[in-house]
Amino acid sequence: MRKMTDPPEKVDWKCARCGETLEPGKVTVAYMKSRFTVDLMKCSECGLVFIPEDLATGKMAEVEKILEDK
Amino acid sequence: MDQQELRKLEHQCIQEEPPWCTATCPIHVDARGFVKQVRKGDWTGARKILAKTMPFPGILGRICDHPCQDRCIRNRAGDAIAVGALERTCVESTHPGKKVPPLPKQDKSVAVLGSGFSSLTAAWDLIRKGYTVTLFESENRLGGSLRYIDPGLLPGEVIDQETDILTDAGVTIETEHPLNPDTIRGILENFDAVYLGLDTEKPIDTGFAVAPDPFTGSTELTGLFTGGSAPEKADFSPVNMAAQGRWAATSMDRYLQNVSLSAGREKEGSYDTRLFTSLEGVESRPAVDPADPKKGYTGEEAVQEAGRCLQCECLECVKICPYLAHYRGYPRKYAREIYNNASIVMGERKANTMINTCSLCRLCETICPEDFSMAGLCHEARTDMIQKDRMPPSAHEFALQDMDFSNSDKFALARHQPGFDTSTHLFYPGCHLSGTAPEHVFSAYSYLSDQLSGGVGLMLGCCGAPAWWSGREARFQEILGEFKTRWTEMGTPRIITACTSCHQMFSEGLPEAEVISLWEVLEKAGLPEKNRPEPPKTPVAVIDPCTVRHKPKIRTSARRLLEALNIKVDELKFSGELTECCGFGGLMGNANPPVARKVLERRVQQSPRDYLAYCGMCRDRLAHAGKRTVHLLDFIWKPETAIDPAEREDPGFSYRHENRARLKNRFLREVWKERTREMEAYEKIALDIPKAVRERLESRRILTEDVQKVLHHVHEAKGPVFENSETGRYLAYYRPVKVTFWVEYTPQHDGSFLIHNAYSHRMEIIEEP
């Protein structure tokens, strides 16, 4: 899952509930029977995870496909 | 699929069968491969190919009587490829390649009597098999009857050079060795096996009668084998002499190894190949004449002649199917890949997408000279993947959810005609037509109710085809079972389908039911006269859905309706039994949108005419590709909007949902005078989705209702949301079931939402404790 662990870029989004900015942090994601930890941006207060469009439609989709065919 | 089934399938696909030239050649020279190299001007490569099967290419290449040419497919479009002449040019202009490396030695010794071409071949083959070989010749030089051939064609020094290879390879040559009954008796006693060449008119005097088995070359005398033919005879054939020497050498090897002489040798010698090669579009071209017939082809002439070779192969299915072409193979290879895919215990199953991409349209099977069915193969593989819980969830999920929507309270409906408590007929318009042309479904039902007696019931829903296509047999049976229960309750009425997929599912799944298409019913009942639209001024091309390939009655009815409607038809080459898929069938569009797009593009390119479809999905797919396409019903009942029906856009997945839901409500309100379903809270959320965003959502398979659910979650359940400090927009996500949807939006003053973007992923974010 290395592909998904590139350091996140700075984002313009902030958590609307807490009003806090997003900071890189460890997040556990799961699909099929796999579970792993990746670095993603999340709310420094409540931990809400942000997934940008290019990640969802790019690397994340690739990894999903690999796991589906495993 | 077990090994045996795989082999049966591999045998059924004939792409790897040899071409006629190779099959006809007694020693099976790869003439097609040889000619291919000549065509490229690669003479060394060409000679290498000859040397693979030919003994002494320098000799045989000059004198071969080329029986291959008699059965060359090019004969039917000009002349046979002059393989013999090409071989001559090749061996005259090249040298023998590297020496053959020595082979593991056998501890048996064999003798070869005579040095005609069959004897030379036997000696060569036996030394290559590792035996100790001694060749006895009564003359003082090798070649026997070869020396009688015109030296202009086969110079004596070539025979000398070529036969030197035998000495180099380790054959002991005994020339001037008298061959008479005495010496032969001695040889028979001293060697483990003996080959007796009969390549001369005056055969060697053995002192006993020799009656060889024509197939194995064995004789009554154990260990003695024979073969060959004399050049003076009418049937003299150098390549047959080579073949006889070779077959005898094989027999001697088997005899010495103590194994069956005859088992598994059916394809030795000329045989009929099963390879089919189409001549469609092949122009007739005569053979290239050499400027100097005595000298044969120059290099340039040879390249030209080789250029006429058809390089025979079948690929009939691959030529007409963009899906089969996409994976760069052919069914035989695919069968192996699918077999391997199922056998993988750990690691990536590389054929999953290939298996799920087939449209199951069965055109390949119709075109194939051997009826190979990719549909059968892929459908079975899908069923197997489902049973083993190895089906990638994303491949079909969207289509299955669409099916569930249609069978949910939002669309599903079953009613007798008002005023009846039983039905003689049941109209089942299907989910596609209801999604694309709900007003036609409404008109058709009203018309059928008027025309048919005994009560025409209506049932809205999905027949379960997506479950069947995706290999989910149990789920399909469940849906069919529910349909059957309701159909039985309604008095087992005759089922009228507007969609041929429904027709197929019901007629195959419920053999006890009478299933008939709307087109057959309308043909018989007659068309409505009132309010009928004008027929088009120019002919249309009819798009037969792939599901009617083997339903000629439905195809005929559709055409009779067109005739009655005064619509001129310009038939496509790929129509009727040869019709093509629009890229929706088999859920191809779900599993592999880019390949489905290629299939659709091919369909679009078939004709510049406007298309007329009588399948809702074909209509929408073609419209989506920008092709002017009408539905047959557009000429029976006037559409409610004024736009040209051929210009009507593909409604898309979301709007088809909406159309279905509205159609149900309209039926309930206007026909049954019933209250309609209460809308769920999320459905009431008003959205403003610009066209470009709508198209992106469509291609990402994100429905309007998915967007509504996210917004409902944020605003009612205080779900997660981000705010952009630059743009002021919001970004929210929600995971209703197995997919997480992200929506970027701006709330509007009127309470609606302007949608800027949406995307999704299947991977789940695990909430930290």
Image (cartoon, coloured by chain):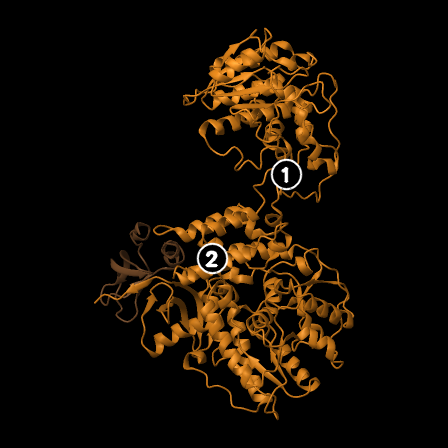
In the picture, which chain is orange? B
Whether labels 2 and 1 share one chain: yes
Q: Residues within 10 Å of mark 1 (few under 14, many from 20)?
A: many
Q: Which mark is residue B359?
A: none
Residue found at the far bottom of this picture: B419
> In the picture provided, is B331 more to the left or to the right than B241?
left
Is residue B641 visible to us here? yes
Q: Secondary structure at mark 2?
A: helix
Q: Residues within 10 Å of mark 2 (few under 14, many from 20)?
A: many
Chain that is brown in the image: A
Q: Name the residue beneath numbered marker 2.
A: B381
Residue A64 sits above or below residue B501 on the image: above
Q: Position of residue B174 (x, y in %)?
A: 52, 9
Give the Cα distance between marks 2 and 1.
31 Å
State the residue at coordinates (50%, 65%).
Answer: B698
Tell whether B346 sits left or right of B470.
left
Foreground pick, B392 / A20: B392
Q: Which residue is mark 1?
A: B312
Question: What residue do we see at 31% from left, 62% from top?
Answer: A50
The amino acid sitting under disc 1 is Cys
- Taking B350 as reference, is B82 above or below it? above
Identify the subunit bearing mark 1.
B
Give B358 or B532, whichever is nearer the viewer.
Answer: B358
Which residue is rendered at x = 45% and y = 80% of the image?
A: B684
Q: Using the rendered view, name the quadrant where residue B293 is placed.
A: top right
